[in-house]
Amino acid sequence: MRLIYTLLLALFLSSSVTGQKLVSYEFDFTMPSVLIGFGATYDVSLYKITYNTVDARGNEHVASGLLCVPQDSTLVFPLGCYQHGTVAGREDVPSNTMGGFQLPLAFAAHGYIVAAPDFIGLGDSPGVHPYVHAATEASAAIDMMLAVRELEGVLEDVNLNDQLFIAGYSQGGHAAMALHKEIETNQSELFTVTASAPMSGPYDVSGSMVDFTLGDSDYGTVAYIAWLSLGYMEAYPDLLMDFTLESLFKPEYIEDITAFQNEEIDLWTLNDRMIATLTATVGSITPKNTLLPEIVEALKNDPDHPFSQALADNDVYNWVPQAPTRMYYCEGDDQVTFQNAIVADEYMNANGAPDVQAIRLDTDAELLNHGGCVVPAALGGIGWFDTMQNLLSATQEISSVEGIKVYYADQFLTIEVENPAIQNSTLKLYDMAGRQLSSSSIGLGIQRYDMSAMNEGFYLAQLSNNNQILNSTKVIKY
């Protein structure tokens, strides 16, 4: 049984402080690092928290999320925010240790205190979820992070430094970009972004995603269009006041979409039913054939149509990040076209972004679909974040373990291991995009690794043993 701790304003905050976000927190369990994978270093304790925020119409609202805390009360950790991908429905959320909870757990196991909001309309948050709605994806995350700050001094193991790392996959990639944009554009007095890693996200909703999903090719996740339509009618009541399901979709799809709206079926059941109807009626899985023809025409060709305006309002590619940003993608992605990352990269860099890159993770010889891209994207993001991470004790920066020296000279990376207790370690070399380039066993004595074939620039050499990082050294190859 979970232990529930309800936080009272009189107990934990001065009565002069306004704007309290945290409502309650519940300890769930602690996951040992050996069970987490992803090169985990720390055991991680999981908490469900509820907090105050606003819904899509600006009304006061209680939302929920998962807090993942690495277990070392002597350290001061960066704050992380992980935005989850599309889930099946209300219960399939991080705070229930279901949809999307594994990746915030993995980031936390590398030394980040990670807030993973469930989003508005999911988890304990009532009402309709405004799917792929940038404003609430950002506000739910900001308010949850503020709630996490309130846990400092309440939970012994919540000790935060001033770094903030943002990540998310799929819908969460869109949400991560929306959060980064909102902080740098409007909330810089609250947070400063250290780096962000949106992964496989639909950043160009009104362009690349419309072309990809409403073309002549099969698209296997038809139900996304239904959820987006329901969410936008909730989020834009004035703009879309004249629209109903009947004015958007063909009659044969209304009953199933309504069942999903009423939470009688989940998203994947809806998807199966819509695919079955498409197959029976048109012989292909083409989402445009679920919509009325005039809606398809408007979405493709009329930027002034109300739904086109709603889509454009949720584009998150057309701004200029100031913090380092890496957009991980796969060209084989069958749900979120890789063109989203290309469009964002081109726009941001053309407009002066200081450090933005789109990073491809698959190859022409081995294309990765949306599911196959998850692990390499997460490993890339974690590895890249780790090159910038500060882990501090109460008084000083954590020093490297004694008996190890790592340095670069004359085209070679040299590792000197003098401590017998840490032999049989593993050396991993990463580029500054977070991609692992090599992994080798290390013994006692001096070992040299030839870097002459590698490009000039920054690298991270990380030495670990028994899931504990012993030494992380930034290497400049010149």
Image (spheres, rainbow, N blue to C red):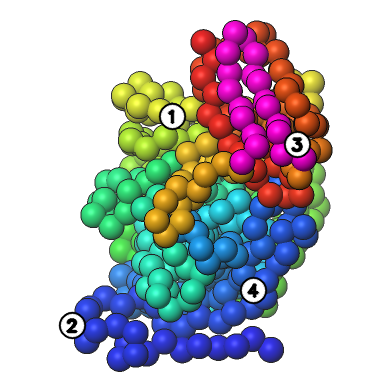
The one nearer the camera, 301 or 12, is 12
Disc 3 residue type (three-letter):
Thr
Give the structural element (helix, strand or loop) at label 4: helix
Instruction: Give the CA separation, mark 2 to mark 1.
Output: 42 Å
Q: Which mark is residue 16?
A: 2
Instruction: Give the CA separation, mark 1 to mark 4.
Output: 34 Å
- Characterize the magenta stretch by its predominant secondary structure: strand
The residue positioned 75% from the left and 26% from the top of the image is 445
The residue positioned 73% from the left and 64% from the top of the image is 32
Give the structural element (helix, strand or loop) at label 1: strand
In the depicted structure, whether residue 132 falls above or below residue 203: below
- Residue range in magenta is 402-420
Whichever of callouts 2 and 4 sits on the residue coming sooner in the sequence is 2
Q: Position of residue 459 (x, y in %)?
A: 57, 25
Going by the picture, which residue comes out furthest to the left? 16
Residue that badge 3 annotates:
426
Residue that badge 4 annotates:
96
Whichever of callouts 1 and 4 sits on the residue coming sooner in the sequence is 4
Labels 2 and 4 touching (C-beta < 8 A): no
Mark 4 nearby-residue class (10 Å; few <14, some 14–19, many ≥20): many
Residue 179 visible in the current orientation: no
Instruction: Give the CA separation, mark 3 to mark 2.
Output: 52 Å
Residue that badge 1 annotates:
356
Q: Is residue 53 left or right of residue 36?
A: left
- Mark whose residue sits in front, 3 or 2: 3
Give the structural element (helix, strand or loop) at label 2: loop
